[in-house]
Image: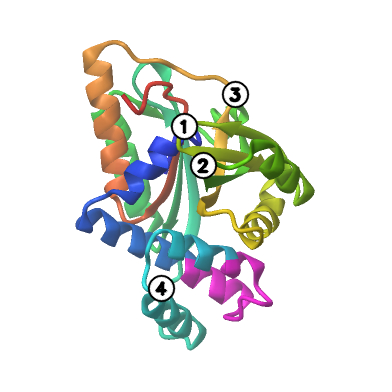
Amino acid sequence: MSGHSKWNNIKRKKEATDAAKGKIFTKIGREITVCVKEGGPDPNNNSKLRDLIAKAKQNNVPNDNIERVIKKAAGGGDKNNYETMVYEGYGPNGVALIVECLTDNKNRTAGDVRHYFDKFGGNLGTSGCVSFMFSKKGIVIVENDNVDEDEIMDAAFEFGADDMTTEDEVIEISCEPADLAAVRDGLASKGYNILSAEADMIPSTYTTLTDEDHLKKMRLLLEHLEDNDDVQNVYHNWENADE
């Protein structure tokens, strides 16, 4: 869950408490359940499931947990029928947010999301009110362990990447969402250490918060959204989210 694909967002998620890790396991498990019901339990024939298994492993979900969820969904043991819901709105001072949910109770989820926006200085909008400000990209994060930048750039572009930026400890590679698995697997096959590979929503513009009340409410809004089991991803354009 991130505003834009900065490594410290992902790093913060990986350093979460045990309780937060449990939330991550629950959310990824829900995604896998829906994916198996839609496309079958064989990752060789279900590319989306293959991507989710890789995502689960990157988030340290045990293999037994992954297999158990797949088997339960394939065997009809999971009776929950989850629906995808996407909410758009504004946080304090006009920060744009997109909230992606998987829910078995649309009324409950809509009520919760609206309550969070109202309570913490935002307002829930209509479909399309902020999504035009974002573009979907695949983001692959590679450990920058004395990596030769020219070599990894050539390799990344060979597998379908369209851009690359370097930070102190990581290299961030972007691509079209459809090319995410090819870029991730291709770079891994060349020995690069893949820290994360996920689709992200990248904002075209950013909003900076300076007012202390706005900062406090924005943090609380994100905390409450991310703590909700129905919420899968939260994207925003808060520029100084990591301060």
Q: How crowded is mark 2: few (under 14 residues within 10 Å), some or many (20 or more)?
A: some
- In the picture provided, is 199 more to the left or to the right than 89? right
Residue furthest to the top: 211
In the image, residue 84 lies in the stretch drawn in magenta: no
- In the picture provided, is 98 more to the left or to the right than 135? left
Residue corresponding to mark 4? 80
Measure the alpha-carbon separation of dots 1 and 3.
24 Å
Query: Which one is closest to the eye, mark 1 or mark 3?
Result: 1
Q: Point out the stretch of residues depicted in magenta.
A: 32-50
Give the residue drawn at x 49%, y 33%: 4
Q: Do the CB atoms of the residues marked 2 and 4 lie less than 8 Å apart?
A: no
Looking at the picture, which amino acid does disc 3 mark? Ser
- In the picture provided, is 95 more to the left or to the right than 156? left
Measure the alpha-carbon separation of dots 1 and 2.
7 Å
Q: Main secondary structure of the magenta part?
A: helix
For marks 1 and 3, the one nearer the N-term is 1
Asked where in the image residue 78 lies, by quadrant, the reply is: bottom left
Provide the secondary structure element on which disc 1 rests. loop
Q: Position of residue 96 (x, y in %)?
A: 46, 26
Measure the alpha-carbon separation of dots 2 and 4.
41 Å
> Residue 204 shows which numbered tag?
3
Q: Do the CB atoms of the residues marked 1 and 2 lie less than 8 Å apart?
A: yes
Provide the secondary structure element on which disc 3 rests. loop
Q: In which quarter of the image is the C terminus?
A: top left
> Residue 144 shows which numbered tag?
2
Query: Which one is closest to the eye, mark 4 or mark 1?
Result: 1
Provide the secondary structure element on which disc 4 rests. loop
Q: In which quarter of the image is the N terminus?
A: top left
> Residue 168 shows which numbered tag?
1
Q: Is residue 111 visible?
A: no
- In the picture provided, is 92 more to the left or to the right than 141? left
For marks 4 and 1, the one nearer the N-term is 4
